[in-house]
Amino acid sequence: QVQLVESGGGLVQAGGSLRLSCAASGSIFSINAMGWYRQAPGKQRELVAGFPSGGIKNYADSVKGRFTISRDNAKNTVYLQMNSLNPEDTAVYYCTVTAVDSSTYRQADDWGRGTQVTVSS
């Protein structure tokens, strides 16, 4: 089983920056895709940024040019650098990983518990 621990959320003023981190641990054989989703109150969860292994990063239109996703494969960690934040970015941010379990060799998607990001105007 894969565990994900997110950190870096908090309260920031509009125009500010935050950096989210998500570290994966557990029975990991390999990690394929890593990404971030978010869910604002009363809204559906939406993809913010994705980073498939060896693939092309993709971003929601609303964050392009402001957010940057990166990953450290040696640390099984994915990051989300968020700049020029605005109140519409307020949401719970969830890390997700598509990994192959080292005990079963099955691929599955795992989710973190989420970290709150609040942007004040």
Image: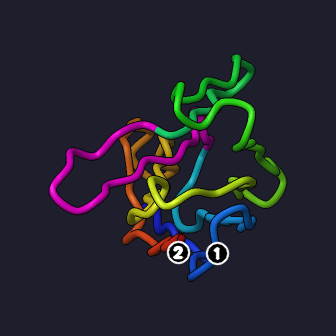
70 is higher (above) or lower (below) than 6 = above
Name the residue type under label 2: Ser
Element under disc 1: strand
Query: Is 103 in front, or is 45?
Result: 45
Q: Quadrant of residue 31?
A: top right
Count of numbered labels shown in the rendering: 2
Q: Which residue lies furthest to the bottom in this view?
A: 11
Name the residue type under label 1: Gln
Query: Is 23 in front, or is 68?
Result: 68
Residue 16 in magenta stretch: no
Query: Is 23 in front, or is 118?
Result: 118
Tell me if 4 is positioned left or right of 112 in this view: right
Query: Badge 2 local density, few (<14 within 10 Å), some, or many (20+)?
Result: some
Tell me if 55 is positioned left or right of 5 in this view: right
Query: Is 48 in front, or is 90?
Result: 90
In percent of width and height, residue 121 lies at 54, 70
In percent of width and height, residue 82 lies at 70, 55
Labelled disc at residue 3: none
Query: Which numbered disc flags the more N-terminal residue, 1 or 2?
Result: 1
Residue drawn at (43%, 47%), measured in percent from left and top? 37
Residue drawn at (39%, 63%), measured in percent from left and top? 91
Q: Residue furthest left?
A: 42
Residue at label 2? 120
Q: Coloured how?
A: rainbow
Element under disc 2: strand
In percent of width and height, residue 38 lies at 40, 52
Residue at label 1? 13
Magenta region, residue range:
30-47
Residue drawn at (58%, 76%), measured in percent from left and top? 9
- Quadrant occupied by the N terminus: bottom left
State how far apart marks 1 and 2 are (Cα).
5 Å
Asked if marks 1 and 2 touch (Cβ < 8 Å), the reply is yes
